[in-house]
Amino acid sequence: MSFWSPVLLSLQITIVSSLIVMGLGITVAWLLKNRSFRGKTLLETAFMLPLVLPPTVVGFILLVLLGRRSRLGEWAEAWLGHPLVFHWSGGVIAAVVVSFPLVYQSLKVGFASVDTELEQAGRVEGAGEWQVFRHITLPLASRSIVTAYILGFARGLGEFGATLMVAGNIPGVTQTVPTAIYFAVDAGNTTLAWAWSGCMIAISFLLLFVANQGQRDAGTRSTR
């Protein structure tokens, strides 16, 4: 197994999962924005559960739902040609589930901060809901969207418990950096564990630096 194999797999899983969770988060936050209905609080509480549940509990539930003995698992295996569990796609699903609460909450706050009078003005001018969302809501909530993506990416990159339960730790196939570090320490190979940890720190630092620089530039432009 190459040193870079877990790193590349972690990035692959995180990039895919972060795009999926952003699409889901933006859609759900937009649909629930300014909507009040019976059970909304219960629904949003369910959204936040993966944030407070132990990752192993989340992983166990996903394992039961997506396993080869479940209807969903059988359907997915027939459609994809491979099982979701003990495959890197299972790691993607685990990362999406555990990062969704942070992404949704950030987007919810961002969309709520947009002045509804500006949105209403767009509707009065004849803009449809999609046009209002695309040209008014999204630009005004851009900082929250960037924050949501960073949080989702970071959470997915560092996911361990649920991923280990669903995808396992197969070197070169499903082994991500967090699981590789854990098993390296368990085997007494602290040098390798430090090397992978340094990789994770460098990637996370670079991501945060670029995001902070982007938000700083956006703030500078908005004050001109």
Image (cartoon, rainbow, N blue to C red):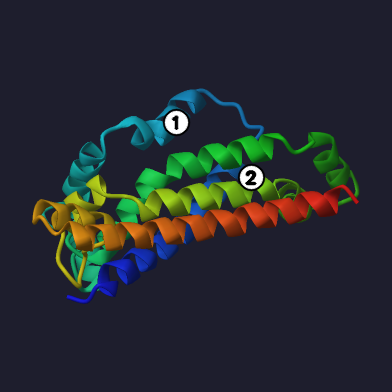
Can you identify the residue that label 2 sits on? 144
Residue occupying image coordinates x 58% and y 56%: 209
Q: Residues within 10 Å of mark 2 (few under 14, many from 20)?
A: many
Quadrant of the rendering where the N terminus is positioned: bottom left
Specify the label residue 43 is tagged with. 1
- Residue with the most extreme bottom position: 2
Rendering coords of residue 61 (x, y %):
21, 41
Q: Amino acid at mark 1?
A: Leu
Element at badge 2?
helix
Element at badge 1?
helix
The answer to whether 212 is drawn above or below residue 15 in the figure is above
Rendering coords of residue 191 (x, y %):
21, 61
Instruction: Find residue 177 and report its image quarter.
Output: bottom left
Depth-wise, is mark 1 or mark 2 nearer the camera? 2
Instruction: Find residue 59 and report its image quarter.
Output: top left
The answer to whether 83 is drawn above or below residue 24 in the figure is below
Rendering coords of residue 66 (x, y %):
21, 53
Choose between 44 and 162: the one closer to the eye.
162
The answer to whether 15 is drawn above or below residue 114 in the figure is below
Q: Is residue 23 visible?
A: no
CB within 8 Å, label 1 to label 2: no
Q: Amino acid at mark 2?
A: Ser
Residue occupying image coordinates x 29% and y 73%: 4
Choose between 15 and 203: the one closer to the eye.
203
Rendering coords of residue 16 (x, y %):
42, 64
6 left or right, relative to 97:
left
Q: Which is more N-terminal, label 2 or label 1?
A: 1
Q: Residues within 10 Å of mark 1 (few under 14, many from 20)?
A: few
Residue occupying image coordinates x 44% and y 31%: 43
Distance between the alpha carbons at the discs numbered 1 and 2: 22 Å
Q: Is residue 95 visible?
A: yes
Residue occupying image coordinates x 84% and y 41%: 118
